[in-house]
Amino acid sequence: MEPIKVIIADDSDFVRDGMRIILSVDEEFEVLGCAANGKEAVRLTKEYQPDVILMDIQMPVMDGIEATAEIVRRGIGKVLILTTFDDDQLVKAALQNGAAGYLIKNHTPEQLKQTIKSVYNGIHSLDAKVFHNVTEFRSKPLEGFDANLFTAREIEIIQLIAEGLSNRGIADRLFLSEGTVKNYISVILEKGNLSHRTQVAVYYLTGRK
């Protein structure tokens, strides 16, 4: 199996080297290059066409949000935001610009690897703390979410998923059985061409799949 090809973009030498070492010793990953700013990240991505770009947000010359937008617009890689910041507006901007995942930097090496794999396999990934914050500041869907795909009840369930409720919590809130909720969610996933609950919430909250 081919390794997942990665570009690391961070203005901290320490962070870049740390992630490079973590990934380089694992045969499942191949680090193609490192960038100290967003402009370098875009250049390296165009040159090497990696599978996943690990992107810091606050960098000189070009920040990670602008670089993410450029990379996604060109369709040359999937961006996983890695940052010490969990500011709601930064999360919103990164997701709106097409970031496929968002992970706070106090992760373990295994969390980093698993999140890269999720993004590589097309599964949107949000750090649990980030997910909680983003669902707090956004209770209505953004443009891009097609409400016409779903019934009123399905929209209600999608909203509760975006609030972070479990199937049991949704069942209690709507006076339904947990099995009925599971059936609704299966239909929602099929109608929206979505893979899992987190992707439902991301689609509702950002308008992106």
Image: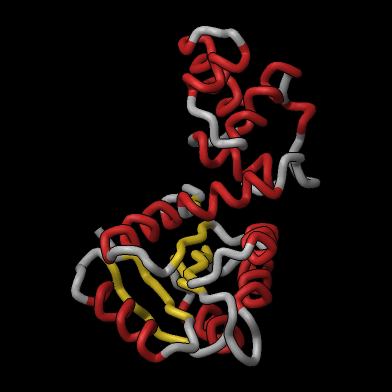
Residue at the (50%, 36%) spot, across then down = 195
Horizontal side of residue 149 vs 188, given as left or right: right
Horizontal side of residue 156 vs 132, given as left or right: right
Q: Quadrant of residue 119?
A: bottom left
Q: How many marks?
A: 0
Residue in the foreground of this view, choosing between 138 and 146: 138
Residue in the foreground of this view, choosing between 125 and 14: 14
Vertical relation: 160 (above or below) 119: above
Residue at the (49%, 72%) spot, across then down = 84
- Position in image of residue 27 (x %, y %): 20, 68
Vertical relation: 190 (above or below) 51: above
Horizontal side of residue 174 vs 55, given as left or right: right
Q: Quadrant of residue 156?
A: top right
- Position in image of residue 113 (x %, y %): 31, 61
Residue in the foreground of this view, choosing between 156 and 62: 156
- Position in image of residue 70 (x %, y %): 67, 74
- Position in image of residue 138 (x %, y %): 71, 46
Q: How is the image coloured?
A: secondary structure
Residue at the (69%, 58%) spot, across then down = 96
Residue at the (65%, 86%) spot, across then down = 62
Residue in the foreground of this view, choosing between 207 and 14: 14
Horizontal side of residue 163 vs 55, given as left or right: right
Where does the N terminus fall, quadrant-wise?
bottom left
